[in-house]
Image: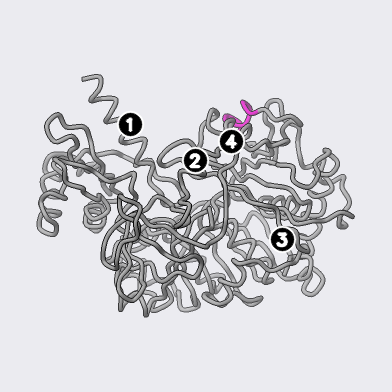
């Protein structure tokens, strides 16, 4: 279960297709390019256990570089292209990366980066970097003599604080050894050599990167979008007869808000499995997606740390709307404020016991803060388990609003507001209030900026009050042309909260 196996068996089969028409790689070409990358890394003195960092946009070169690092036994750090120079340099230094490889389009950030063995640029010059293309072209296409398994080390997106590198031991088995993800994807989603997988998200994020590499281990074809566009996504499903894909709820919302005649224009009947994860999905959004695409919608709840994994299919979800499923990795334990387990139906902090192990790189205090000596590890989420063992998420603990001593989870109001026809995106946060401690505020990105103003504010507040207890509803609404949302669907609420906190402090 490795691309080299499929390069020998089906050399001409497409391994990677860029959705914008910028290129295609067969399995034979993927094999040759990843081997050249492995030789390049060895030529730079990198040995098993060393680290390399990538600052790359979605491109034809991305996955071959990852496979080159994987077969050279390296730790490869796929960095977010949304970070600034300071955060990116922090990741380079914190990870111990020997080399940085960056796209020329990201030169403004990349030119400030330094690594012990320097930087290399792809697709355009970067000040202080050497071009990578001639270096790779000079390498032989055959396999290096000392192949061994490497692994990724990905950094949390920093939605609630400084990015954390999530790592673990290097695998010791043979290069084509199956792993836990391969077993799960075959069992739950029928991954196979015949699959055609559409990836609409940035490859630097855990799920797109790991699932695309899993597709290559099965011998399927990956179609990569450079960025998500709702109508273009539907056109690609039809054009490539896509069988599998993975999305985030904001993508569902954007597709559902396309005009009905546009949605009806495209044939999505080839879809067998449409997976979503990374952020909570409003119940009404998911219900409408199942009505549109049929029972092909699957959901999982997991994290880059890999300590737990829950999954649910469409049929189960229709019986348990709002659930993220039962656990397949790790035992779910809901803990109260006293760290004791809570019974079914009681909300508390979600822990997974007995799942995969992890650590935050060079941050033992953060590792310790995520783990419990008896009950495993937590992703920082709040929720409950019902009598049948199905997990329901309430919100992230860090996002909880405490107003007048009452705990308020903003996800409820967000799920209501996002379905309003005039709303493109929304964040509900707690802002400082002299008397109540915090006050509930919504920050809305309207579909049409011309609608922003007092009338829409009153309309949206009334819309929520018709559906939720008034204590959970925003007392005021501000409008933004674009919310600070990560391409993976996660919202940088920390940035919004910090802004309001700073304004209150200044006042």
Instruction: Name the quadrant containing residue 79.
Output: top right
Q: Is residue 246 placed above or below 131 in the rendered structure?
A: below
Q: Nearer the viewer, residue 458 or 23?
A: 458
Q: Is residue 47 placed above or below 274 in the rendered structure?
A: above
Residue 84 visible, this angle: yes
Q: CA distance from mark 1 to mark 3?
A: 44 Å
Q: Residue 287 at x, y = what percent?
A: 30, 71
* Residue 25: assigned label: 3
- Check whether the beta carbons of the residues at disc 1 and disc 3 lie within 8 A of each other: no
Q: Give the label, 3 or 2, closer to the camera.
A: 2
Circle nearer the N terminus (1, 4): 4
Circle nearer the N terminus (4, 3): 3
* Residue 366: assigned label: 2
Circle nearer the N terminus (1, 3): 3
Crowd tier of the residue under label 2, counting other residues whose Cα lies within 10 Å: few below 14, some 14–19, many 20 or above = few
Check disc 1 and report the residue beneath it: 498
- Check whether the beta carbons of the residues at disc 4 and disc 3 lie within 8 A of each other: no
Stretch of the chain drawn in magenta:
107-113
């Amino acid at each position: 279960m490795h691309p080299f196996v499929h390069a020998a068996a089906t050399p001409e089969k497409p391994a990677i297709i860029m959705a914008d028409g910028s290129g295609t790689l067969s399995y034979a070409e993927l094999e040759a390019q990843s081997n050249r990358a492995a030789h390049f890394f060895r030529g730079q003195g990198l040995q098993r256990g060393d680290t390399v960092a990538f600052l790359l946009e979605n491109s034809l070169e991305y996955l071959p570089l990852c496979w080159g690092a994987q077969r050279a036994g390296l730790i490869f750090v796929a960095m977010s292209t949304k970070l600034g120079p300071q955060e990116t340099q922090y990741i380079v230094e914190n990870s111990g990366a020997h080399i940085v490889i960056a796209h020329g389009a990201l030169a403004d950030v990349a030119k400030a980066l330094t690594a012990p063995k320097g930087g290399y640029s792809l697709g355009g010059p970067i000040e202080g970097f050497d071009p990578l293309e001639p270096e790779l072209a000079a390498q032989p296409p055959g396999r290096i003599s000392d192949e061994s398994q490497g692994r990724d080390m990905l950094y949390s997106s920093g939605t609630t604080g400084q990015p954390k590198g999530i790592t673990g031991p290097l695998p010791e088995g043979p290069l084509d050894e199956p792993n836990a993800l391969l077993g799960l994807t075959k069992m739950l989603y029928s991954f196979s050599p015949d699959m055609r997988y559409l990836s609409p998200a940035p490859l630097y994020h855990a799920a797109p990167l790991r699932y695309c590499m899993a597709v290559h281990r099965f011998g399927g074809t990956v179609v990569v979008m450079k960025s998500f566009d709702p109508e273009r996504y539907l056109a690609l499903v039809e054009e490539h007869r896509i069988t599998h894909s993975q999305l985030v709820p904001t993508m569902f919302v954007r597709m559902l808000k396309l005009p009905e005649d546009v949605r009806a224009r495209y044939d999505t009947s080839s879809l067998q499995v449409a997976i979503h994860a990374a952020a909570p999905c409003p119940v009404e959004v998911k219900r409408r997606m199942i009505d549109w695409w049929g029972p092909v919608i699957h959901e999982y709840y997991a994290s880059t740390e890999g300590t737990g994994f829950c999954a649910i299919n469409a049929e189960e979800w229709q019986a348990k709307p709002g659930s993220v499923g039962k656990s397949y990795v790790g035992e779910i334990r809901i803990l109260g404020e006293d760290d004791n387990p809570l019974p079914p139906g009681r909300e508390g902090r979600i822990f997974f016991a007995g799942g995969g192990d992890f650590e935050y790189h060079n941050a033992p205090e953060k590792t310790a803060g995520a783990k419990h000596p008896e009950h495993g590890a937590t992703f920082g989420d709040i929720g409950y388990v019902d009598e049948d063992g199905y997990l329901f998420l309430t919100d992230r603990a860090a996002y909880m609003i405490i107003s007048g001593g009452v705990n308020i989870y903003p996800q409820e109001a967000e799920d209501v507001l996002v379905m309003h026809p005039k709303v493109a995106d929304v964040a509900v946060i707690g802002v400082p209030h002299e008397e109540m401690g915090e006050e509930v505020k919504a920050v809305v990105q309207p579909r049409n900026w011309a609608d922003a103003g007092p009338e829409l504010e009153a309309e949206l507040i009334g819309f929520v009050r018709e559906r939720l207890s008034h204590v959970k509803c925003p007392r005021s609404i501000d409008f933004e042309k674009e919310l600070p949302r990560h391409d993976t669907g996660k919202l940088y609420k920390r940035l919004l909260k910090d802004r309001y906190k700073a304004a209150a402090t200044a006042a």
